[in-house]
Amino acid sequence: METLSSVVRVRNLSELESKRYDVLVIGGGITGAGVALDAVVRGYKVALVEKADFASGTSSKSTKLVHGGIRYLPNFDFSLVHEALVERGLLVQNANFLVEPLEFVLPFYEGDRHPVGMPFTTPGGVGLGFMLDIGLWMYDLMAGKRAIGRHRRLKVADVERLAPMLLTQGLKEGFTYYDAQTHDARLTMAILRTAAQYGATIANYAEVTSFIMEGPLARGAHVRDALTGQTYAVYARHIINATGVYSDKVEELTGEEAMVKIEPSKGVHLVFSREDLAIGDSAVVLPETDDKRILFIVPWESRVVFGTTDTGTGDLDHPTTSAEDIAYLLKYLNRYLSVNLTEKNIISAYAGYRPLVKLGKGGGSTAKLSRTHVVLQGSSGLVTVTGGKLTTYRRMAQDAIDVISQRDGAKPVHPTLNLPLQGSAGWNRLQHDINRRGAQAGLKPSIIKHLGHSYGTEAAVILKLIEQDPSLAQPFVDDLPYIRAEVPYACQYEMAMTPYDFMARRTSIILEDWHQGTTFVDDVVALMAKEHGWSPSEQNAQAQSYLAVVHGQELAERH
């Protein structure tokens, strides 16, 4: 089993310079991870570099959903919805421990005129419920054989039973339909681990600073190790730019004008405790906002994720949550819920940028820009794949590598259609054994469930760490399922290089803990020090760096 430890990272960086690659992938978000996996399983020699940590951008800032995009139906974007529904089904199949079906409740109120973002309405709203029903039938049908559940029309009493926190005044009826839920950063990690297993050379904190040009063609890239400052020259026959909101900036490193215009759109989410929202096991769709958006209330282990906004751009490296963002979200939460929530109820807030592709000229709302992906080739030979959404990452990668196959005169094959991601193969068979071993180790049921949902069959490796050192079974926070054994696992197998990598992406402690991990960061650092060989002064520097980032985010959000 290929590991992604700090030792392997150093080895990989050395290999980047000593070997010649078929494909160099720039970007370690979910799209770049998917591209690396698709290329390597087709037989290409692949390298992937990421300037920060894996999934540190958009790929860890989603609503944690794998969905068809129900809000695109009213805009008649049927091809996007169909593509996303097919990919949703493939993810449920290929990442069965990490992507699970989730029921959604969609209430319909008296006075609603643009439910689920309908761009049109009817006089007095007559017939809108019928139109919603038809739309959900289409949603089911477009999923075809990969459907994960059929929608139902609900009476008021059924809505109250499934979503007891909703206001009942003016409630006319409701619907349920099905999509799926995942942990976005862990999904990215599973894809990267699978790519490494098949032979891809992968490194985080490795930034492309310039391209190696031979005449007009890009034949490689200079890559800087952000942790040591050392620079490596990497040569590859094909270079794929999968950097999301940075796509146009990376393209410009070739000296060409960017082929694609990215309009970053900020999406903000708030995290609450389940108790504060009195939510059950079903997600809830708030049907209408003044700007014709829909908002999701999504149960997520012991917490609830609520969002999202769709606003303009800012500092791409440091997206922040403004007072206006929070006020906007709380306004609609309190409009539809029987509980009254304030900023004091917010455990955390997070923001990220969608890489929306601008089609044609002129400005306009980012909410109206396409979520469809594009694959473009420049005269330098650089291939850029961008746009799309988390759910469609596999299809984006497939389309990008099809371009490479065509360049090489090879017949495109699509092996990722039925390729289990790491942790999936044998999960149904091993799940009982992992539950048994977890119970023997004295782990609470919530912790055992978390390990299964986060790591799949790899949970067995974490349990082995606990069996060797029972102190690693201790949780960090009483009401969260994260345990000490996940730290050495993240360092040995998932290239976690800093406490922030562990707190924000290998786990979601920074989102789910009221103190964002600040009360036990020293414990995390001490565990990481054993893996990375940090001196006492380096341990202190790592802890202080983490605290500075967290406190800096809090300051930015207050302003």
Image: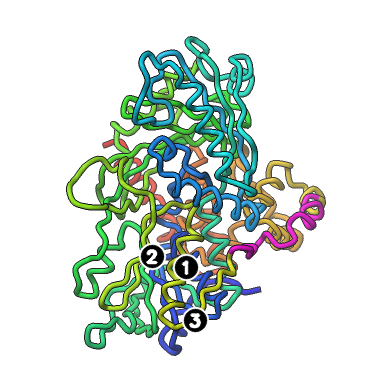
Estimate the x, y position of residue 383 in percent, counting from the top left.
35, 71
Q: Is residue 182 above or below residue 385?
A: above
Estimate the x, y position of residue 394 in percent, counting from the top left.
51, 60
Q: Which residues are magenta?
A: 417-435
Q: Is residue 291 left or right of residue 194?
A: left
Q: Of residues 291 and 431, which is closer to you in this image?
A: 291
Q: Is residue 46 left or right of residue 152?
A: left
Q: Is residue 536 visible?
A: no
What residue sits 55% from the left and 44% below the top?
A: 142
Q: Is residue 240 above or below residue 101?
A: below
Residue occupied by mark 1 = 35
What residue sits 36% from the left and 23% below the top?
A: 121
Estimate the x, y position of residue 289 in percent, counting from the top left.
36, 26
Asked whether disc 2 touches disc 1, contact meaning CB atoms under 8 Å apart, the reply is yes
Q: Residue 242's mark?
A: 2
Q: Is residue 223 magenta?
A: no
- Quick one: SS at disc 1? helix
Residue occupied by mark 3 = 410
Q: Quadrant of residue 122?
A: top left
Q: Label 3 to label 1, Cα distance in Å?
A: 17 Å
